[in-house]
Image (spheres, rainbow, N blue to C red):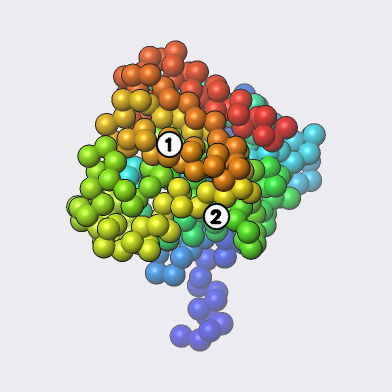
Amino acid sequence: MSAALRSLIAAPAPEVAPLPPAAHCAPGVRLLRGVPYAVPDGSRPLELDLWLPGEATEGTAGGTAGGTVGGPVPLVLYVHGGAWRIGRRDDMGMRLRDWEPGPFARIAAAGIAVACVDYRLSGEAHFPAPLDDLRAALRWLALRSAELGIDTARTVVWGESAGGHLASLLALTGSAPGHTGPSPAGAVIWYGPSDLTTARGGWDPWDAATPEAALLGAAPATVPDLARAASPVMHAHAGAPPFLLVHGDADTMVSSTHSHALAARLEAAGASADLWTVPGADHGWYGASDEQVTEIFTRSLGFVERLVR
C-alpha cells in the first residue's frame, strides 16, 4: 500500500477533524458528544464529551460549537472513576446518575464548559498511560479552544475515585517546575487515592490482585519508583494550584486518610488545600443524604467558580 493511499484511508487526525454538530440537551446548554481527541498507537480512539454553555457565536466553527457572546468560557476537565479498570466518561458517580438536569448540564448552565474525557483503562495500558491521555486531552482542548469558545488557561480538573487520583496527578505534575503545556488552575477531588506506597485502610501495597497493581502492572511495593510516581502525595509542591478534597469519613474502599495525607503534604509545601470530610459517607457518597450530596456538588461548583471568575 502506498503512503498516499494509506493517508487517504486513515481518519482525519483529531487536531484537524471536523467537530460534530452540537445537540441542545438542556436550556442554554449544548453538547458535543464523542469527539476524538487522541489516537494512541495501537489503541482505540479516545473521545470526550463537551458540554458548552450559551449559544454558538455566529461565524464560529460554522455554528457547530463556538463560544458565548461574552467571550471564551472557563473549563472543567472531568475524570471518571472505576478503579482505573472500568467506568464511563459521562458518569459522576452513582448518587448523581438520576439527576435531571444532570451534573454536567448544571455546570454548563452556570457558564462553565465541561470536557468529560476517556482515558486508557488498566486492561488496555499501564500507568502512566492514563495520565498521558489526560495531558493529551488538555493539549487538544487548548489547540482547538478558539473554535470551541473555551479558555483553557482557566481549567479546573474534577475527578472522583480513580479519576480523582488521576486529576490530582494532572494538577500537580502540570504545575511542577519545568513543565510545559497547559496547567490546571485548580482541582476538585472526590474520595481519590493519593498514596500507592503505604498500607491504608486494609489495602496492602504487596498485594498483586488490587486495582492499584493492575494500574501499575505489578504490586506497588515491587515497583517502588513507579508507585511513587503514581502517588499524588509525592508531587506536592509550593506552586500547586488550589485543591478542594472531599471524602466520606466512612469510606470503606478508599480510606479518607488518603485525602488527609494529600492535604497535609500540600499545606506543608505552601500550597492551598481545602479538606472537607463528610460525616457518615462511604465511597461514592453511599450513606449520605440527598441533601448532603447536593451540598457536596454545590460547594464543589462554587469552588470552581471562585477560581475561574
Residue 223: image quadrant is bottom left
Which residue in the rendered view is the most extreme toward the front?
A: 268
Among the two numbered marks 1 and 2 on one chain, the one whose residue lies closer to the N terminus? 2
Residue at image point 73% right, 32% down = 309
Q: Residues within 10 Å of mark 1 (few under 14, many from 20)?
A: many
- Which residue is more in the foreground, 285 or 76? 285
* Residue under numbered circle 1: 259
The amino acid on which the numbered mark 1 sits, given as a three-letter code, is: Ser
Asked which secondary structure carries label 2, the reply is: helix
Residue 84 position within the rendered picture, expressed as x and y whole percent measured from the top left: 35, 49
* Residue under numbered circle 2: 173
- Which residue is more in the foreground, 34 or 1? 34
Residue 3 position within the rendered picture, expressed as x and y whole percent measured from the top left: 53, 84
**Res 97 seen here:** no
Residue at image point 22% right, 54% down = 206
Residue 124: image quadrant is bottom left
Vertical side of 227 occupied by 154: above or below: above
Asked which secondary structure carries label 1, the reply is: helix
Residue 177: image quadrant is bottom right
- Which residue is more in the foreground, 165 or 113? 165
